[in-house]
Image (cartoon, rainbow, N blue to C red):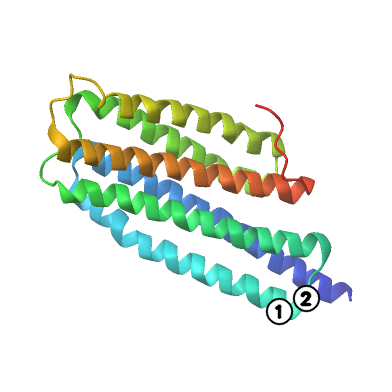
Amino acid sequence: MALIRSVFQEELDGVSQSLVDLSNMVSESIHKATQALIEADLKIAEEVISNDEKIDLYQHDLDTRIIDIIARQQPVASDLRALVTALRMSADLERMGDLSHHVAKVARLRHPLNVLPPELKDLVNHIGSVAENISRKIPTVIETRDTDLALQLEKDDDEMDKLHRQLIGSMSNNTWAHGVESAIDVTLLGRYYERFADHAVSVSRRVYFLVTGSFATPNR
């Protein structure tokens, strides 16, 4: 029984490590997507778009492993909760990869032009930095199961929401002179970054649930 439990624990540890690896992949993806956007760099945009398939395949493989572990081991209590939570976290992380892919596709769509009006470059670069900062915390949250750090992502997301409102506001006044097409591009980009951060927060909330058994989140 001790040997069986040891093998099972190794499988659980492997799932956790795969979630960390997937988190690092999507962090790198949003970093490069922002770089492609700011610099109008087609090569980097194409790299992000191509790598999204790798993220998808990695996530699908992870989900298959988790389902196989559940079928073979028939876990209960905290072990089952950990595996079911891992399935949901992998879905959030895969969606973050998709959103990075969407940012890169917008950058590619307007190449060789820069999709961003000059006056919005700094703001969007800041938004991209916040998104990357949030995603870089996820591996530590998963590895350490630090509930305080998990809750910190809620505050980081508040900053993203503030920046998103600022971005939308820049197109809502009479000074906007870049046309409807540009406004649509910027609106979509803002939404992609905002949703990226939301999925990161969802991962942190799932870790919080895994540790505490509660969905409740203390007031910020």
Is 11 in front, or is 75?
75
Pointer 1 with pointer 2, Cβ within 8 A: yes
Residue 35 vs 49, above or below: the answer is above
Q: Looking at the picture, how far across and down is residue 12, in whole percent?
A: 70, 64
Q: Secondary structure at mark 2?
A: loop
Q: Can residue 98 be seen here?
A: yes
Q: Nearer the viewer, residue 7 or 125?
A: 125
Determine which residue is flagged by label 1: 71
Assign a secondary structure to mark 1.
helix
Residue 37 image point, x, y percent: 25, 41
Please indicate whether residue 142 sits to the left or right of residue 173 in the image: right
- Residue 46: x and y in percent read 24, 56
Tell me the residue at 14%/46% (across/down): 110
Q: Which residue is mark 2?
A: 74
Residue most extreme to the left: 112
Residue at 65%, 77% in the rendered image: 68
**Which class describes the residues within 10 Å of circle 2: few (<14), some (14-19), or many (20+)?**
few
Residue 40 sits in which quadrant? Answer: top left
Q: Quadrant of the C terminus?
A: top right
Q: Residue at x 82, y 67 (%)?
A: 76
Query: Which amino acid does the dot numbered 2 rest on?
Result: Gln
